[in-house]
Image (cartoon, grey):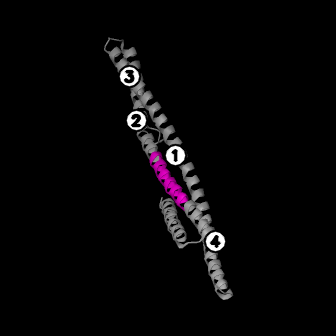
Amino acid sequence: MDVKEASEALSEASEKNRFLIILISVMAVLLSLVEMSASSELGQSSAHNIAASDLWAFFQAKSTRETTLKTAADGMETLLAAGLSPDQAQLLQRKIGQWRSTAERYESDPATGEGRKEIRQRALAAERARDRAAALDERFEFSAALLQIALVLCSAAVMVGGWVLTFGAIGLGALGTALGLWGWLGIFLQ
């Protein structure tokens, strides 16, 4: 091999390495953005999970209170059959009416949004948001894994050469980028 051929081979290798270094830089930036998005979605998933759990606990507390009031009202109605004085019967009927009214409000209270019906809807919405964030996190995690593998293949291609490593890195990087874009699209289409 003469000097001219060696110089051309070195120039070609240098161009290929320049391309790979730029590719590594681009994939590293994408990896950073994907990892940041994954972390954000994981946090969102946890926050929505806590909110759903809190709402279901609130729902259960309302259920317990409603059942207690209905049971107390039913028990008081049996006392009415025992032949109480009219004043006592009127007092009991008023109290039974209050308890039944409160129990109905525990079932549904659109004014405050704190009836069981409204709480259930909010809890289900929080669960849907949690599941959506978890799915987005999964997309970002797979994207990050593919980009990391692509970075390793690019680095190996710089060191040892070979188009197989380069094309493998490009393919995995493109797939990782597509998964990241799919995740970001999911965020923006909320």
* Left or right of residue 162, residue 106 in this image: left
Residue 125, given in percent of the width and then of the height, sits at 45, 47
Eye-nearest disc, 4 or 1:
4
Residue 137, given in percent of the width and then of the height, sits at 52, 53
Question: Is residue 115 placed above or below 131 in the rendered structure?
Answer: above
Marking on residue 48: 1
Marking on residue 71: 3
- Mark 4 or 1 closer to N-term? 4
* Left or right of residue 6, residue 57 in this image: left
Mark pair 4, 3: CA separation: 74 Å
Q: Name the residue under label 2.
A: 107
Residue lying at 67% horizontally and 84% vertically, measured from the top left: 7
Mark pair 2, 1: CA separation: 24 Å
Mark pair 3, 1: CA separation: 34 Å
Name the one closer to the observer, 112 or 148.
Answer: 148
Q: What element carries label 4?
A: helix
Eye-nearest disc, 2 or 1:
1
